[in-house]
């Protein structure tokens, strides 16, 4: 759990914001897109990148 | 394992249950699938870390106004300032909370008097070794305080003003009065206006007008007192007693001069009428103890009484 929290906090700012808005605030991609004034596609890319980064972070830490 | 058929947003689509069956099967077979599931389950278990969310909202709001949205980064140098600001607000809130709900207490030490004003401007003068407890919150609508010991009140006009003690309560509208409530002794003197006294020990209710007092000592009949002074004597550095068992006088001496009386074969219910000064220990001891024919020796703060 601590490992996960560390990984989340090491995410680039935008990726972390969008990822947490989706997972914890339970906002849909569309809502996040409207909030930040970008396309849904951009949000999808950010979330995808965030997950990729989280996975590499977690797998690289013993 | 390479996932050739999966695009650069498939993880987002997976989160949204938008993957086709084939894509899902392929993804589940990948070596990283379990890690992703763990990440999502772990994240969903996290309790909303509000600082992160606030931060996120703030910077999203900022980036809405910026032209180059994707490359906009929130200025992270301000984060520690935000943290300090949040802590300060939290501390102020906590302080206000404690201040708001907890009782205010004033107390006086041996031989000391404490003067203070209540939120409505009413004045209180506490005699030695006494304490008053009240709630600042809603004071103007509920003027009630608790007293242990002795105090003089000069009450501003307003709602009923009530002094509760362990032995009885005194309520008034606006007046000057003195209340003394120590173990087994309850005494009220009215100096101005009108005072209502409720004695818990016999559930009696009395109204006092100026120059009238009420005194109830355990195992003695309650009496009405008359006096002609305009202020309690203790405010003029005098302690005055009328038909009061000597043990209360000794305990008043103890409180005034931080003493401890030690005695064995001595009738402490002898009645005492008289006074002692509050600013001269030697004279006070002489006045009281000579009048009841007691010999004594002083050992530091202890006064040993001989038969």
Image (tube, helix red, strand yellow):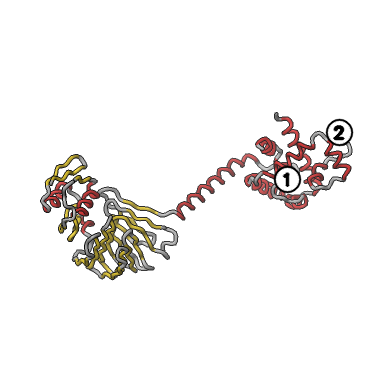
Q: Subunit of mark 1?
A: A
Kindly indicate the quadrant of the structure image that contains residue B164. Answer: bottom left
Real-space Cα separation, disc 2 to disc 1, in angstroms: 26 Å
Q: Residue at x 29, y 55 (%)?
A: B149
Check the picture and name the quadrant holding the N terminus of chain B. Answer: top right
Kindly indicate the quadrant of the structure image that contains residue B207. Answer: bottom left
Q: Nearer the viewer, residue B238 or A11?
A: B238
| Residue A61 appears in the rendering | yes
Q: Which of A34 and B9 is in front in this view?
A: B9
Q: Name the residue under label 1.
A: A18
Residue B286 point in image, percent of width and height? 13, 49
Q: With A4 as the anchor, is B285 left or right in this view?
A: left
Q: Which of B34 and B275 is in front in this view?
A: B34
Q: In this view, does A2 lie above or below B272?
A: above
Residue, far top: A62
| Residue A50 appears in the rendering | no
Q: With B134 as the anchor, is B62 left or right in this view?
A: right
Q: Subunit of mark 2?
A: B
Residue A2 point in image, percent of width and height? 65, 36
Q: Which of B260 and B178 is in front in this view?
A: B260
**In this rendering, the label closer to the viewer, 2 or 1:** 2
Q: Mark 2 points at which residue?
A: B2
Q: Residue at x 26, y 63 (%)?
A: B188
Residue, far front: B265
Q: With A23 as the anchor, is B224 left or right in this view?
A: left
- Tell me the crowding category of disc 2: few under 14, some 14 to 19, or many 20 or more residues within 10 angstroms, Cα based: few
């Amino acid at each position: 759990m601590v490992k996960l929290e560390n990984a989340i906090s090491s995410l680039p700012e935008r990726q972390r914001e969008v990822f947490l808005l989706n997972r914890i605030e339970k906002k849909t991609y569309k809502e996040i897109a409207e909030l930040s004034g970008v396309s849904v596609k951009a949000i999808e890319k950010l979330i995808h990148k965030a997950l990729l980064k989280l996975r590499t972070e977690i797998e690289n830490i013993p | 394992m390479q996932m050739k058929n999966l695009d650069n947003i498939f993880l987002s689509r997976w989160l949204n249950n938008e993957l086709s069956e084939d894509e899902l099967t392929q993804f589940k077979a990948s070596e990283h699938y379990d890690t992703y599931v763990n990440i999502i389950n772990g994240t969903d278990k996290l309790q909303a870390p509000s600082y992160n969310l606030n931060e996120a909202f703030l910077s999203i709001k900022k980036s809405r106004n910026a032209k180059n949205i994707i490359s906009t980064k929130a200025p992270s140098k301000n984060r520690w300032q935000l943290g300090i600001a949040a802590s300060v607000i939290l501390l102020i809130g906590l302080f206000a909370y404690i201040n708001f709900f907890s009782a205010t207490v004033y107390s006086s030490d041996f031989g000391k008097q404490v003067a203070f004003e209540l939120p409505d401007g009413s004045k209180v003068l506490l005699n030695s070794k006494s304490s008053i407890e009240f709630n600042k919150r809603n004071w103007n609508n509920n003027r009630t305080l608790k007293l242990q010991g002795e105090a003089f009140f000069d009450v501003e006009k307003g709602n009923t003003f009530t002094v509760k003690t362990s032995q009885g309560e005194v309520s008034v509208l606006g007046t000057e009065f003195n209340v003394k409530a120590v173990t087994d002794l309850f005494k009220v003197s009215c100096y101005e206006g009108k005072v209502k006294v409720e004695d818990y020990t016999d559930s009696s209710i009395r109204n006092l007008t100026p120059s009238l007092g009420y005194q109830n000592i355990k195992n003695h009949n309650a009496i009405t007192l008359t006096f002609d002074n305009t202020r309690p004597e203790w405010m003029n550095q005098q302690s005055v007693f009328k038909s009061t068992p000597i043990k209360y006088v000794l305990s008043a001496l103890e409180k005034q001069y931080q003493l401890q009386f030690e005695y064995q074969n001595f009738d402490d219910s002898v009645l005492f009428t008289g006074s002692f000064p509050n600013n001269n220990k030697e004279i006070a001891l002489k006045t009281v103890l000579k009048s009841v024919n007691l010999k004594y020796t002083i050992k530091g703060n202890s006064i040993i009484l001989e038969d």
